[in-house]
Amino acid sequence: MKLENTKAQMRKGILEFCILSILHEKEAYPSEIIEALKDAKLIVVEGTLYPLLTRLKNAELLSYRWEESKSGPPRKYYSLTKMGETFLDELSGTWKELNTAVTKITKNNTK
C-alpha cells in the first residue's frame, strides 16, 4: 500500500467539508477558495475544484452569481444556500464526533 495514496484519500474525504466551511464565512470565487485551501496546507488544483463546485451546486448546496471583473473576464462567486447551511451544520456535528473518536483511538500514535 502506498502512503501517498492513503494521504490523498484522507484529504479528498474532507475537501467538501472544507469548501463549504470557507463559503460559510463569505462568498468566494474559485481562486479565493483554492488560496484558502492552500493557506491551510490543502493543495487543490482547479481540475479538482471545479467538478466539486458543480456537484455541490447541482445538489443545491451552493448557488453562484456572476460579477464583472476590472482585470479580466467576469467571475463566478459561490455562496451557500439554506440547504447548504443545514448540510454544513450536519457535517460539522459529524466531524466533531469523528475527530473525537479518532483522537481518542490514535492518541498514543500521534506526535
Image (cartoon, rainbow, N blue to C red):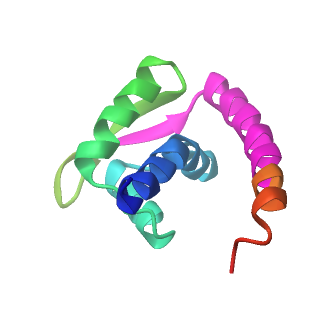
Foreground residue, 10 or 74? 10
Total number of numbered discs in the rendering = 0
Place of residue 63 in the rendered image (x, y in percent of width and height, measured from the top left): 47, 28
The residue shown at (45%, 46%) is 12
Q: With respect to residue 64, does 39 lie above or below?
A: below
Foreground residue, 40 or 105? 105
Question: From the viewer's perspective, is 15 left or right of 21?
Answer: left
Q: Quadrant of the C terminus?
A: bottom right
Residue 77 location, quadrant: top left
Question: From the viewer's perspective, is 76 left or right of 80?
Answer: left
Residue 51 location, quadrant: top left
The magenta-colored residue range is 75-99
Asked if the magenta segment contains residue 81, the reply would be yes
Question: Is residue 27 in sight in this rendering?
Answer: no
Q: With respect to residue 58, does 63 lie above or below?
A: below
Question: Is residue 43 in sight in this rendering?
Answer: yes
Place of residue 53 in the rendered image (x, y in percent of width and height, measured from the top left): 39, 35
Place of residue 103 in the rendered image (x, y in percent of width and height, measured from the top left): 79, 60
Question: From the viewer's perspective, is 41 left or right of 22?
Answer: left
